[in-house]
């Protein structure tokens, strides 16, 4: 059924994304009041999982848990511009109440449903004419009403309403809920762990009279709890500053004070200047391991939703900081080595392995693995640790026992029809495998550890196949096959091939059945999606599958339906929809039937003609409105359609496009003439305003445009006259601007020559009507020239005995900072 749901979703997605443009026909705001209860949903559904969790954590029977929803639902029935009938539904306003707290934390925003299912009822004069099942997002969705088209004669006295059967919560909502639920349970669990620690420390106060072992262990425990609390960031996640029902933040403040005190005592103990007693060392080593054992025992005293903190506190954390302090303690105790007595870190490692062995003997595999993990952390951190064979044996046997027990529970739960428990225990086993497979190292250890795991996976897959749960079975087989292939297990006795054949055959038959179901329901689009998916599925898994003999008959039925629908739309003057249905019929024929001479291509070409003509008419309107770019886009669309539907030889369309080209060219030439005349007016205005450069640029741009449309017979007499009339002005301004820019780099002789030429042209062409008289050269040089240029001017006028000019530049030379010695030499 998951595959069928996937097909349904794909079909609905096409409808949601179709971008329909509609005119309102019937619309109503419908009030909604509904309730969500566990009995409305199947086991394992998102909703059932959340209801079960709320019941357990809020200490209620699951049937007492209810969520109430009130809101306003927009319901409309419309036609698009091509006459296609559809309905649009959206939740406008809503509130939620009921079981909207998890323990003492408000979670209403997470619980508001994302979708609903129910029925759309359509009435004509209060008489029911159609009842249509719907499954839709509350944020808005479109429902295709083509199936009731034959019953629908118009909108006169039409009414509609939605009847909601139940609401749905999404996968992301379930995940968000689970994340928040875990955070809340962690909050209460750590609150309890803190309460126990603070009560004990209130009785056994931290002080300097404590033994070294008690001082060190106190720091380890306090720092471990503090570090885990920091890691969880409960203050931010749960917004505890706004609401802290168990006063966890207050307890954290006390813990921080104790941590500072414990750290101080730890350091002072190390600084006493004497080595630790051997008896204290033994107490420290045992107490460090007992710290983890204590939390193992405490976890057994609490229900699962309160044990998270105790399970975490079994582990060394944070590893580097904690083991660095252990190193300090070891140095304190091992100042003098005694022959035959293991050092502190080795003894702690040994004790962890011993305790893990004890847990394994009692078949408490998770606890054994947790303690072995601590031993491994110490082994990795301290190079001096001598690892033991017993550690490896405990690790491998604990892992094998845990995986086997999880999968055994999964198999038994499945046989008892408790599918939720079966799935949970299998996923736990798979997660443990993924976490530990790389840690085991050697292939020999991997094969020994997971020998039973793979067999149990295949056994559970067989149970799922017997129960027609094909997708879940194939997932298990994939997991097992991956382990077998990766580690070269013997697999002949596991019967992978026959199991895969059963699984894929079951899925394939389900897909083919779904085609028949949609045909019975007169849902040809869904039927086509299922047919195409089944064909793809068969090809993908051809190693195990052969084509179902029903496929051809179903393909022929769908072919006929789409073909006839295409003809109907073509006769009804709906060419775009006609093409859609005819092309679907063509696809079915090519993939499944291979009939010749169906005539579909000819029909598609016939349907395409009015579409192309429509584009051409729109383009002609854009030409008339002088929106030539839009016209060219529409023309290109017409050409694309002409090519796509093989109408390149159609004389009428070719003539229409040719005529459009002429209109575009003519309209472009008319526009160009207008623009030419307008540019002449603009150029005169710019010159009158003294914007000579801008006027010249306008003329240049116009020249480029005229070259682009060289085929247009544009009258450019006035434009050419302006260009000639102002040729000397443009030349003068360009040369003047160039001289101004070059003044700081060229020699004085060149500056003088160019300035003199400009001054002569200014007078000769009587340019005073357009631009100001050029300033004196010394003023220009003062503004733009450098000191070197000024000195050259002094030399030039001195050599040419023009002493008045020479003294003017000499004074300017002095102002620019020339030294007195140089200026005096020129004065002489």
Image (tube, rainbow, N blue to C red):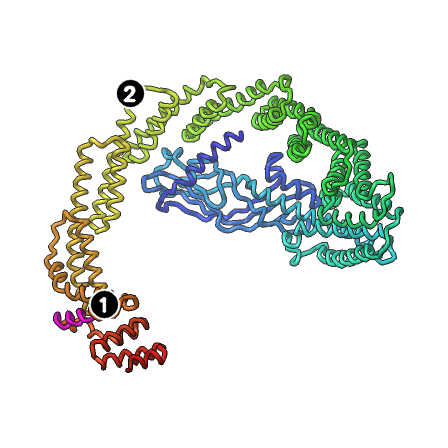
Q: Which residues are magenta?
A: 754-765
Q: Is 205 left, or right, of 97 in this rendering?
A: right
Element on which disc 1 rests: helix
Q: Position of residue 128 (x, y in %)?
A: 44, 37
Q: Is 734 left, or right, of 382 in this rendering?
A: left
Between marks 1 and 2, how big is the CA–CA gap?
Answer: 86 Å
Q: Nearer the viewer, residue 323 or 819?
A: 819
Q: Position of residue 374 (x, y in %)?
A: 75, 40
Q: Residue at x 20, y 62 (%)?
A: 696
Query: Predominant secondary structure in magenta?
Result: helix
Q: Position of residue 391 (x, y in %)?
A: 77, 33
Residue 520 shown in magenta? no
Q: For the residue carrying disc 2, how many other residues have a C-alpha within 10 Å: few (<14), some (14-19), or many (20+)?
A: few
Q: For the residue carrying disc 1, how many other residues have a C-alpha within 10 Å: few (<14), some (14-19), or many (20+)?
A: few
Q: Residue tagged by mark 1?
A: 750
Which part of the image, by quadrant, shows the C terminus?
A: bottom left
Q: Is residue 112 visible?
A: yes
Residue 597 got which mark? Answer: 2
């Amino acid at each position: 059924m998951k595959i069928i749901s996937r097909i349904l979703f794909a079909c609905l997605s096409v409808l949601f994304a179709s971008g329909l443009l509609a005119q309102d026909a019937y619309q109503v705001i419908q009030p909604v009041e509904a309730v969500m209860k566990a009995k409305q949903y199947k086991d394992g559904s998102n909703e059932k999982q959340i209801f079960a969790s709320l019941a357990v954590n809020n200490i209620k029977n699951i049937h007492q848990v209810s969520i109430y929803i009130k809101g306003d639902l927009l319901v409309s029935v419309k036609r698009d511009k091509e006459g296609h009938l559809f309905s649009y539904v959206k939740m406008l306003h809503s509130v939620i109440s009921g079981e909207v707290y998890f323990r003492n934390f408000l979670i209403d925003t997470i619980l508001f449903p994302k979708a609903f299912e129910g029925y759309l009822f359509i009435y004509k004069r209060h008489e029911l004419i159609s009842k249509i099942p719907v499954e839709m997002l509350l944020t808005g969705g479109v429902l295709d009403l083509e199936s009731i088209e034959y019953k629908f004669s118009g909108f006169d006295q039409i009414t509609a309403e939605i009847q909601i059967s139940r609401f749905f919560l999404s996968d992301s909502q379930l995940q968000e809920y689970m994340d928040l639920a875990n955070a809340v349970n962690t909050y209460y669990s750590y609150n309890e762990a803190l309460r126990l620690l603070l009560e004990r420390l209130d009785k056994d106060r931290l002080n300097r009279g404590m033994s070294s072992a008690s001082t060190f262990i106190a720091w380890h425990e306090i720092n471990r709890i503090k570090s885990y609390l920091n890691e969880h960031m409960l203050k931010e996640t749960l917004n505890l500053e706004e609401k802290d029902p168990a006063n966890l933040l207050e307890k954290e403040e006390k813990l921080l004070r104790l941590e500072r005190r414990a750290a101080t005592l730890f350091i002072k103990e190390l600084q006493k200047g004497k080595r630790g007693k051997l008896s204290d060392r033994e107490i420290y080593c045992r107490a460090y391991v007992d710290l983890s054992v204590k939390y193992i025992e405490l976890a057994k005293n609490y229900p699962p939703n309160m044990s998270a903190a105790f399970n975490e506190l079994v582990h060394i954390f944070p590893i580097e900081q904690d083991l660095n302090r252990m190193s300090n303690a070891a140095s304190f105790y091992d100042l003098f080595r005694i022959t035959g007595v293991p050092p502190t870190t080795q003894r702690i490692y040994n004790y962890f392995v011993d305790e893990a062995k004890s847990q394994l003997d009692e078949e408490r595999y998770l606890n054994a693995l947790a303690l072995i993990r601590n031993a491994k952390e110490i082994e990795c951190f301290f190079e001096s640790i001598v690892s033991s064979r017993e550690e490896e044996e405990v690790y491998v046997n604990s892992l094998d026992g845990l995986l086997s027990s999880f999968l055994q529970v999964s198999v038994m739960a499945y046989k008892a029809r408790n599918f939720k428990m079966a799935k949970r225990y299998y996923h736990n086993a798979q997660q443990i495998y993924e976490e530990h497979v790389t840690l085991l190292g050697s292939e020999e250890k991997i094969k020994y550890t997971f020998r039973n795991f793979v067999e149990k996976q295949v056994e559970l897959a067989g149970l799922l196949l017997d129960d027609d749960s094909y997708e879940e079975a194939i997932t298990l087989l994939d997991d097992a096959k991956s382990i077998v292939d990766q580690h070269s297990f013997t697999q002949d006795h596991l019967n992978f091939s026959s199991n895969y054949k059963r699984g894929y055959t079951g899925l394939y038959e389900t897909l083919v059945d779904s085609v028949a179901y949609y045909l019975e329901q007169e849902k040809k689009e869904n039927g086509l999606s299922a047919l195409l998916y089944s064909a793809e599925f068969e090809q993908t898994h051809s190693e195990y599958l052969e084509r179902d003999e029903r496929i051809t008959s179903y393909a022929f039925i769908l072919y006929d339906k789409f073909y006839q629908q295409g003809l109907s739309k073509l006769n009804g003057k709906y060419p775009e929809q006609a093409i859609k249905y005819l092309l679907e019929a063509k696809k079915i024929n090519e993939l499944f039937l291979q009939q010749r001479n169906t005539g579909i291509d000819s029909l598609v070409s016939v349907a395409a003609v009015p579409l192309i003509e429509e584009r051409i008419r729109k383009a002609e309107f854009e030409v008339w409105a002088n929106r030539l770019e839009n016209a060219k886009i529409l023309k290109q669309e017409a050409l694309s359609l002409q090519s796509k539907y093989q109408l390149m030889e159609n004389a009428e369309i070719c003539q229409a496009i040719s005529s459009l080209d002429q209109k575009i060219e003519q309209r472009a030439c008319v526009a160009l003439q207008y623009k030419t005349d307008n540019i002449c007016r603009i150029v005169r205005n710019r010159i009158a305003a003294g914007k000579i450069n801008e006027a010249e640029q306008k003329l240049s741009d116009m020249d480029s445009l005229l070259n682009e449309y060289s085929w247009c017979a544009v009258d450019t007499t006035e434009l050419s006259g302006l260009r000639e009339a102002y040729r000397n002005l443009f030349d003068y301004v360009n040369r003047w601007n160039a001289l101004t820019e070059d003044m700081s780099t060229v020699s004085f002789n060149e500056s003088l020559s160019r300035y003199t030429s400009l001054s002569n042209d200014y007078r000769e062409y009587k340019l005073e009507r357009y631009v100001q008289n050029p300033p004196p050269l010394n003023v220009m040089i003062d503004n733009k020239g450098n000191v070197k240029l000024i000195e050259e001017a002094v030399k030039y006028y001195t050599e040419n005995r023009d002493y008045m000019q020479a003294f003017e530049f000499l004074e300017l030379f002095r102002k620019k900072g020339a030294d007195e010695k140089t200026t005096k030499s020129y004065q002489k």
